[in-house]
Amino acid sequence: MSAVADALVAPAVTLADVRAAAERIRGAVMRTPTIPAPAVGRATGCDVWLKLDNLQATGAFKERGAANRLALLTARERATGVIAMSAGNHAQAVARHASLLGVRATIVMPRFTPATKVVRTESWGAAVVLHGETLAEAAAHAHALALREGLTFIHPYDDPGVIAGQGTMAIEMLEDAPALDTLIFPVGGGGLLAGCAAAALEMNPNLRIYGVEVEGYPAMAQRLAGQPVSVGGPTIAEGIAVRDVGEAPLALLRRLGIEVLVVPERAVEQGIALLAEGAKVVAEGAGATGVAALLAHPARFAGRRVGTPVCGGNIDARALSNVLLRQLLRDGRILRLHFDIPDRPGVLADISRRISAAGGNVIEVKHQQLFGAPTVQSTELELMIEVRDAAQGTALIAALEAGDYVVRRG
């Protein structure tokens, strides 16, 4: 797209617009804290500050844009109601702030949407319509309903009012931590990054600002590079798993010269675990991608004062548990060990004694004597062992091998 075309598409979102949005949403949206995160900083080699928008009433930053856009409704639009399409945080944000304003809200969600998200959205007073097998099908149905019933469509990111509302995050970050020299924002459709970049660069033109996407869904990075969009696959960062980015955010980011980094799925899981264990903060996948960028691109941020939002905390408890356990395995703090041991009295006791002497804690045992072992004179044993760190794990395995046990890590 040409610079002239960009200028026609890009909304005139300025610091003044974002400040006006901040006044509109004052009292309806929490002014969340921006806090130092020394444990995250030690792990990433920079001075890290976290903006805790996971503390919002709906657990995510989407309230900012939704609250501002709904505050801009005309009297007629308020009377007829609003409609939105979302399988996640935008749905709850629109539902909550429509309820606070006494505006009727309809939310179209794909049929695959987890029941918990449907229930939470309905709990804010919205009427939920389940339609379509994909987000695109749900969006098409929402637009059709909007036309048929005269409802105002509240877009999750391709709307100047939403973009300005999301930009309020950057103002708060820089007011609370003015020494920051670098900001990182997750990118789905691009509204958060566009609004925050527009406001922050007017406040401090010397800031470095980056977006971050997960490798399976690098749509904004691809569009900025003039490449065809190719996305897909499962991701823990489903909140930013977007195929169609906003044209208005895209044009704004091009105009501002913002770079979007791409991080691997593993870095997002590491970010979730580091936030939980190091900063004592619960983040969903999308909310941890700023920290993932620090882990995946350490040389770029070494020694800098970096601010990034934990923009959402709506992660399924089972998913969080799995991520934390996987990280413990990667760090070598949980060992999965396999043995083929002689089937004779005292062997299990000897193995237990060696593990205990090395400081390990057995948390799971699988002992297959009849069918899994290679011969009738042996037994298959699998142990899950908790250790302090990788070095202690290495010492523990050495102690077992000193007893002539063949140990395989699994």
Image (tube, helix red, strand yellow):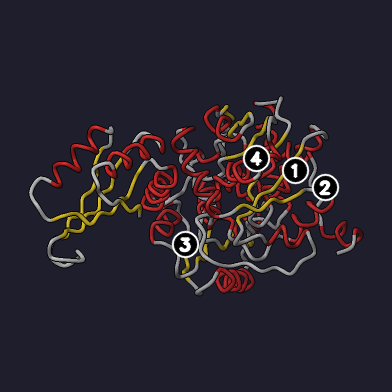
In the figure, residue 375 lies in which quadrant? bottom left
Q: Which residue is mark 2?
A: 256
Q: Earlier in the sequence, mark 1 or mark 4?
A: 1
Q: Do callouts 1 and 2 mark residues in contact (Cβ within 8 Å)?
A: yes
Q: CA distance from mark 3 to mark 1?
A: 34 Å
Report helix, strand or loop for mark 1. helix
- Residue underneath mark 4: 298
Where is residue 25, by image quadrant? top right
Q: CA distance from mark 1 to mark 2?
A: 8 Å
Pick the quarter of the image with the N terminus.
Answer: bottom right
Task: Classify residue 168 by image quadrant.
Answer: top right
Q: In this picture, is 390 found above or below 378?
A: above
- Looking at the rendered structure, the kind of residue marked 3 is Ala
The residue lying at 57 percent from left, 74 percent from top is: 137
- Which residue shows up at 79% across the image and 32% down it? 203
Q: Nearer the viewer, mark 3 or mark 4?
A: 4
Q: Nearer the viewer, mark 3 or mark 1?
A: 1
The amino acid type, in three-letter code, at marker 4 is Pro
- Mark 3 vs 1: CB contact within 8 A: no
- At label 1, counting other C-alpha atoms closer than 10 Å, the crowd grade (few under 14, some 14-19, many 20 or more) is many
Q: Amino acid at mark 1?
A: Ala
Residue 149 x/y as whole percent: 59, 70
Q: CA distance from mark 4 to mark 2?
A: 24 Å
Residue 197 numbered mark, or none: 1
Residue at screen point 38% across, 51% down: 322
Q: Residues within 10 Å of mark 3 (few under 14, many from 20)?
A: some
> Sequence order check: which comes first, mark 3 or mark 4?
3
Percent coordinates x, y for residue 222 in the rendering = 73, 62
Few, some or many residues within 10 Å of mark 2 (<14, 14–19, 20+): some
